[in-house]
Amino acid sequence: MKKSILITGGAGFIGSHVVKLFVSKYPEYTIVNLDALTYAGNLENLKEIEGASNYFFEKVNIQDAAALDQVFSKHGITDVIHLAAESHVDRSISDPLAFVKTNVFGTVNLLNSAKKAWAGELGNHLFYHVSTDEVYGSLEDGGFFLESTPYDPQSPYSASKASSDHFVRAYANTYQMNTVISNCSNNYGPNHFPEKLIPLCIHNIKNNKPLPVYGKGENIRDWLFVIDHARAIDTVFHQGKSGETYNIGGFNEWKNIDIVRLLCQKMDEKLGREKGTSEKLITFVKDRAGHDHRYAIDATKIKEELGWEPSLQFEEGIEMTIDWYLNNQEWLDHVTSGAYQDYYTELYENR
Ligand code: NAD
Ligand code: TYD
């Protein structure tokens, strides 16, 4: 059967890299990018492939069940890679319901459309849910998240993603749908919306604005270059076993403050500023409510069973990321105009 793959959230940060990889690597597949184009979705992320003959775009909200059914039948969708989501923890703290609507309700809508479209032949199709390591909760200074680690989400964002993971497993168990889930650590790289730590700091360093570090900056995240995540998604989609979960990570843990200092140092070099200039912008601000201390993924299973591992060293990836932002000022201008200004003022002013 010729594959017609529905990739949701394909105009977002990670989704756009997945769409670009699949459209160029698999000309024999039809790739349908379904995205509501929220503040986080941007068709400019897809310029390289927008004219490809195997690529289609549908502006649809996953909360709209009837529109989803139409897309399944119009394109004869055979498989789903589901990335559409509200993705930012700080936004989930101020508006949890938006996360329930898209991440939980929207995911169940998508599962229902797939179940309907694939009725009688569910075994020939795959529903792949792209999820986060944040579902496992927060670690102290030792240990790693394994695929068997019990779920313990701590933020409205992670609670909504945990819930959507549970629904995907429930559809596998109840209706024998072929499903696979991957839970990945923090991504960084080109096209990252500047509400997240790394692109926000790059943007602010460039503009000589304060670098807001939550609490003492001691929280730890494991970082993976976005194109390595897209490669992992390709691997899991093609080789992952139905019903399984795969953790994806970089074995690359950093304290927030050390990342911010690294960005300052690299940007001083690239912008021809005197050493130490950008570090003066570091500003410790009120901590995030319920801030998870540490995330750390054990990505042994995907390496041993499917042969995937990260291809890029962190410092190399950070250099490429900074260069991308310095060379794509127009992209940054577009995404930081209008609504971004309001968001930034509300979250950071008087913090
Ligand atoms: P993003 O916020 O950059 O992009 C999300 C995309 O989904 C946007 O294009 C947006 O327009 C679209 N979208 C949002 N609500 C929608 C709706 N109701 N209907 C249709 N489209 C909608 O997010 P991202 O960082 O690219 O993350 C993609 C996926 O990967 C998410 O499911 C996220 O939970 C997961 N994930 C992200 C990270 C990370 O570090 N960013 C790590 C692990 C997993
Ligand atoms: P973020 O990029 O929002 O990803 P996540 O919350 O999903 O891990 O944040 C990464 C870390 O950086 C997290 O510990 C919160 C911290 N942080 C700051 O210190 N300042 C900021 O302005 C932001 C956005 C995040």
Image (cartoon, grey):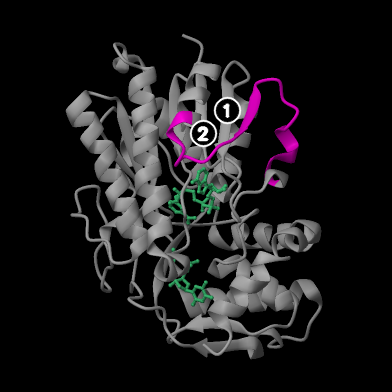
Q: Secondary structure at mark 1?
A: strand
Residue 98 drawn above or below residue 196: above
Residue drawn 59% across the image and 75% down it: 262
Say whether residue 12 is visible: yes
CB of mark 1 within 8 Å of CB of mark 2?
yes
Task: Please state if 31 lies on the left or on the right of 170 as rendered.
Answer: right
Q: Which residues are magenta?
A: 45-66
In the picture of the structure, the residue carrying the numbered disc 1 is 32
At which x and y percent is residue 193?
Answer: 61, 59
Q: Is residue 164 above or below residue 59?
A: below
Q: Which mark is residue 55?
A: none
Q: Is residue 214 above or below residue 72?
A: below
Q: Which residue is mark 2?
A: 7
Q: Is residue 47 magenta?
A: yes
**Place of residue 191 in the rendered image (x, y in percent of width and height, measured from the top left):** 65, 53
Q: Position of residue 238 (x, y in %)?
A: 42, 26
Q: Residues within 10 Å of mark 1 (few under 14, many from 20)?
A: many
Q: Residue at x 81, y 78 (%)?
A: 272
**Quadrant in which residue 197 is drawn:** bottom right
Instruction: Give the residue type at disc 1.
Output: Val
Q: Position of residue 187 (x, y in %)?
A: 50, 56
Seen from the viewer's position, the closer of residues 206 and 179 is 179
Disc with the residue nearer the chain's start (1 vs 2)? 2
Q: In the rendered view, does 147 fall on the left or right side of 38?
A: left
Quadrant of the rendered structure where residue 227 is?
top right
Q: Quadrant of residue 40?
A: bottom right
Could you tell me which residue is drawn at 48 percent across and 47 percent down? 310
Q: Is residue 219 shown left or right of residue 347?
A: left
Q: What element does badge 2 sit on?
A: strand
Residue 65 lies within the magenta run:
yes
- Apparent side of residue 40 relative to residue 153 in the rendered image (left or right): right
Nearer-the-camera pick, 187 or 178: 178
